[in-house]
Amino acid sequence: METEQTSTKSSADEQPLMEHIRELRIRLIYSLVAIIIGACFSYTYAENIFYFLCKPYFESFPDSILIGTGPADAFLLKLKMAVVAGTLVSSPVIFYQFWLFIAPGLHKEEKYLLIPFLISSTTLLGIGIWFAYAVVLPFSFAFFYDQYTSIKITPTIRITEHISFTAKALISFGIVFELPILAYFLGRIGVVTSQMLISGVRYAIVVIFILSAIMTPPDVLTQFLMAGPLLILYGISILVVRFTERQARRQKKESQT
């Protein structure tokens, strides 16, 4: 009898898990389709995207060139740029699919936050990309150029390496700027609390500067250019989690009355 009850309970536990996996697969498929469509659209503007990604480099590396070292480099480069640009262009769709995946676990009043969520997540992504493009990349390339001139070497950079470096920086900063959105949902489900984030400030500062050292050139200025926004975003995340805690307390009081 106990064996049958255990088996029934196990099946009931596995059923929701399988449903979540199927739902996740559907959302990933829709997101992939959106990326492919965005990539096809972006491929037609590959030359404009190339100019956009190379502008900070040529401003810091005057009279320099970018070279290809293989016959298929140009084509593969256009494909890579199209995929990166397509992912960014389709980001609202990807955020929407993420919302649909987590929506069943939200409270009724939270489901009306769809539009604010799409606007804020897309805006933060755009701000992160803009900050990397307008601030971080110029300082980084200027630092790299100074290292070449200090030892009197004329730089001849592979175009694939340049685009990979630039795309990584743009995407990394775009993702990092989503930290307050992540904090909101982690706070809502109780994974993190504001007190937890406050008590872990010292550890967070160490982790932030380690990440900054890894993701930026080895000079203090550019490390601070990434660490500064991360520290600010961490502080904003604490306020966001406090907001979610106040919401939870208010909902609890309303349910008790």
Image: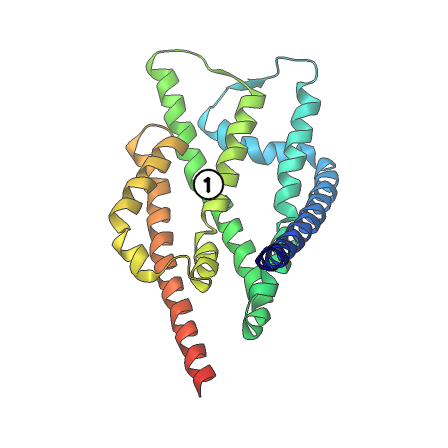
Amino acid at circle 1: Ala
Percent x, y of residue 33? 73, 45
Report the residue at 62% width, 54% height from top: 7
Q: In this view, does 1 lie above or below 147?
A: below
Percent x, y of residue 56? 49, 33
Q: In this view, does 80 lie above or below 158?
A: below
Report the residue at 48% width, 51% height from top: 178
Residue situated in front as seen by the camera: 155 or 186: 186
Q: Is residue 163 above or below residue 136?
A: above
Q: In this view, does 23 lie to the left or right of 238?
A: right
Q: Is residue 216 in view from this perspective?
A: no
Residue at the farthest bottom position? 257
Percent x, y of residue 214? 38, 31
Which residue does the numbered mark 1 point to in the structure image?
132
Residue 114 location, quadrant = bottom right
Report the residue at 46% width, 62% height from top: 189
Residue situated in front as seen by the camera: 50 or 23: 23
Circle 1: element type: helix
Report the residue at 31% width, 39% height from top: 209
Percent x, y of residue 220? 29, 33
Query: How many numbered discs, if any?
Result: 1
Colouring rule applied to residues: rainbow
